[in-house]
Image (spheres, rainbow, N blue to C red):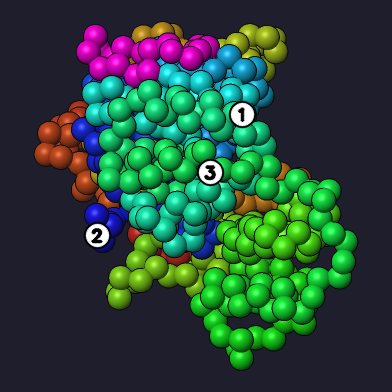
Amino acid sequence: MNMKIDYKEPIEVADNIFWLGFPDFEAGFSNNPYLLYERNESVLFDPGPGHPLFRDILLQKIEKICKLTDIRYIIVHHSDPDLCGAIPYVENHFHPGLLILSHSRTNLFLPYYGIRKPLVSIEDGDTLLLNQKRKIQFVHTPYVHFVGSIMSYDEQTESLFSSDIFAVLEKDWKLHATKDYLIKAKNFLESYVEGKESIMYTYQAFKKLKIKRILPQHGSIIPEELVNDFIELLPQIEPGKVLVNKNLQEDVVNTSLIEEIKDYYFSLINETKNQKHFLDLKEILDDAGAKGITVLLSIVDFILDLEKKTGRRILNKEQRILDYHILSKKSFSTENAILRKMIQIQMPENTNGEVELEKTIELKSLSVNSYKEEFIILFFDIRNFTLWSQQKNPDEIFFTLNKEMSIVSEIIKKMGGRINKVIGDGILAYYPSNLADSAFRTTIKIHTVLHKEKLLPAAIAITSGEVAIGDIGTDEKIDYTLIGSPVNYASRLNDLALKGETAMSLSFFEKLNDKNKNVVLTNPFLLKGEFKEKNSEELIHYYKIKVIKYN
């Protein structure tokens, strides 16, 4: 079942249910957003972490399945940022009437992420009917691991979206779980759930459902042949693993226990004792922390089980509650592991088909989270705005500017573009490289709508090419931005365009289909030109057309 899979692509795991996840083989913190496609009433489950990089990956995968505006609902299974953080970044790309569904206890917290779309509270036993035929049932699982935690059950495919139930932190990640996944799921639940009563309540909820597959929010999908094994694991869970056991003896831990811990740790990291020498438990935990959160939690889970078995306290209080200092060191491997994996997924491959990790590491050393990819760059700028604004009061200036920016941004997003930033009276946006025709039609529509609405006229420039995109800035201010020659060329081309005009590089023009090329070439005001970029002998050829003729 775990054949070679291209994780850059969405993967259909049941009838019209797609995994849109973020595999992370370094830190083991893989996120699993899912899409249930049901035409114009499609559902996105737990979009993921809050960063524009995750947004771009998620939206790219969705666009390979359906239109972004087909997403009518987002279902959130609890309030943690690894589920909800992406919502403010994606909500405006989806259906204009998008609704966000979650338990009422969860909805108390969602506005604090900056979510603006309407929140709908759902309770145990509620159902969502999609296009009058496909039904999703909601199951409340209080305190596993949040008071407002829920699961979603798709009746048509008998698929259960289980949130963090049977999730794991796993470096050796596979799309589908195997039998050895059981102990890892047990460790996760025992570490993140405190009470036995809540586990047994959840167990009874599972028993009432006919389940063919379990789709957790972290870790691997549980196939039908293992579903019953995992359900029957629940009564075996002993929650509250990291709580201090007051009955443990305070005796000094003997050498044999330390050796047992060392043996387990070396097997965990696939090394032999003669490769490394650890003097004490602290050195083992330091080394585990440097290797990432998954390794650290695995060794701590083992030690906690050993404490239970021997009745002796091994970890001190600081280590036991996982506030171990290694987690606050912001080590390269722990803090950035998830983002590094996303960068690796997005970065171009070299001639050997290997990800160019050296570039990732070099960018990381500069505190720049970035990747390179070919995009279409659109630069929009209102003409003569400074002169116009000098004659207006502040209220009128900001009302007009906000209205125009909102209209233009909405057109760009509906045509498949993403807003990178609003720069005063301008907008920098970008499109996937395969949407050249859509980007061109965007410029026509913007000019037409601005003229119709009697808003301020603008000039638009479009280029294409490879750019770097990512975080850049200081500790006080980080900006997610685009850097590269195509961005510079777009700015220069925009300077050359007058109000109502679109200027485009020749490289962009060549991406257009024959119909749109003909629109450009037959424009009565077509102008062909060229310019030299600063500090370069390269000539940039461009076309410029007039879409709206102003007096």
Q: Give the CA separation, mark 1 to mark 3.
A: 12 Å
Q: Residue at x 69, y 86 (%)?
A: 277
Residue 495 point in image, percent of width and height: 47, 39
Of the numbered discs in the image, which one, if any, rests on residue 277? none
Q: Nearer the viewer, residue 425 or 531?
A: 425
Point out the image quarter for the C terminus.
top left
Q: Is residue 338 left or right of residue 14?
A: right
**Which circle's residue, 1 or 3, is located before the other in the chain?**
1
Q: Is residue 337 magenta?
A: no
Name the residue carrying label 1.
197
Name the residue carrying label 2.
3
- The 10 Å Cα crowd at callout 2, few under 14, some 14 to 19, many 20 or more, is few
Magenta segment range?
Answer: 116-137
Q: Amino acid at mark 2?
A: Met
Q: Residue at x 61, y 91 (%)?
A: 274
Point out the image quarter for the N terminus.
bottom left
Per the image, label 3 sits on a secondary structure element best described as: helix
Per the image, label 2 sits on a secondary structure element best described as: loop
Name the residue carrying label 3.
236
Q: Amino acid at mark 1?
A: Glu
Q: Nearer the viewer, residue 61 or 551?
A: 61
**Which circle's residue, 3 or 2, is located before the other in the chain?**
2
Q: Amino acid at mark 3?
A: Gln
Figure label count: 3
> Vertically, is 422 above or below 126?
below
> Vertically, is 80 above or below 481?
above
Q: Residue at x 80, y 60 (%)?
A: 313
**Which circle's residue, 1 or 2, is located before the other in the chain?**
2
Is residue 392 among the parts visible in the rendering?
yes
Closest to the camera, between mark 1 and mark 2, is 1
Q: Give the CA separation, mark 3 to mark 2.
A: 31 Å
